[in-house]
Amino acid sequence: EVQLVESGGGLVQPGGSLRLSCAASGFTFSSYWMNWVRQAPGKGLVWVSSIKSDGSSTSYADSVRGRFTISRDNAKNTLYLQMSSLRAEDTAVYYCATLPVVAVADYWGQGTLVTVSS
Amino acid sequence: DVVMTQSPLSLPVTLGQPASISCRSSQSLVHSDGNTYLNWFLQRPGQSPRRLIYKVSNRDSGVPDRFSGSGSGTDFTLKVSRVEAEDVGIYYCMQGTHWPRTFGGGTKVEIK
């Protein structure tokens, strides 16, 4: 069974940091580009960041570039998102997802909630 | 960034009737490799999103054939031939041709 399990969310003060993890199982994690997508309460989906299957290439939304860092450990089948200088507008459910644009399976985690508030 | 505009925002549908959602992009989604990378997702209430369609018109495994995607260039459509209760939720288009990836704002489908 394919699983993507996010963890690390919680309440953090503005300006603080948080590290999200996404543990993958049931598929060949090291073959997939991986992504973080977020959804603010009651709002739509917003792509945050992507990382190539071997970790050699990354991409970020303008709203998080310079503050967030995506990384992966293929030996541990785990995706990460290091978030710093957090702002209230970063409050959202963060999903990890394969988000392929071609004919390979699309997998999503259940999401982890990040709340930035004092 | 490529702006994806969906319409309508809300779509009340009678069970068994068809539904159609439009998605327009601010620039062509034809990639230099000749493919058009336009996906459709459904997010049911309380669930994570699920991809239904990739590359404009290709259904994912397990997606009923009442779902179909069409379009080209900047203009795309998702059609449901006969809406069932399980089709309720928010539908999103997403372009995968250009960086950054961008989603449409969503279309909420509900049963009348």
Image (cartoon, coloured by chain):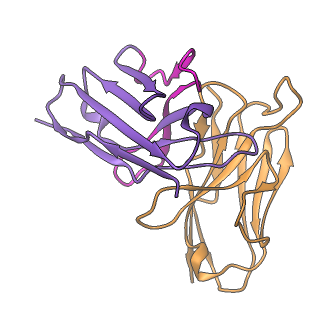
Chain colours: A purple, B orange
Q: Residue at x 65, y 86 (%)?
A: B15
Would you say A110 lies left or right of B103 here? left
Image position, residue A74 (x, y; %): 48, 28
Of residues B19 and A68, the one drawn nearer to the viewer in this rendering = A68
Q: Residue furthest left?
A: A118
Q: Residue at x 74, y 80 (%)?
A: B82
Q: Residue at x 54, y 34 (%)?
A: A34
Image position, residue A99 (x, y; %): 60, 41
Q: Is residue A51 above or below residue B57?
A: above
Would you say A39 lies left or right of B29 here? left
* Residue A46 painted magenta: yes
Q: Based on the displayed image, in which of its 4 quarters is residue A67 positioned?
A: top left
* Residue A44 painted magenta: yes
Of residues A76 and A115, the one drawn nearer to the viewer in this rendering = A76
Q: Based on the displayed image, in which of its 4 quarters is residue B94 positioned?
A: top right
Q: Which residues are magenta?
A: A37-65
Q: Residue furthest right?
A: B34
Q: Based on the displayed image, in which of its 4 quarters is residue A38 positioned?
A: top left
Q: Residue at x 80, y 32 (%)?
A: B28
Quarter placement of the C terminus of chain A: top left
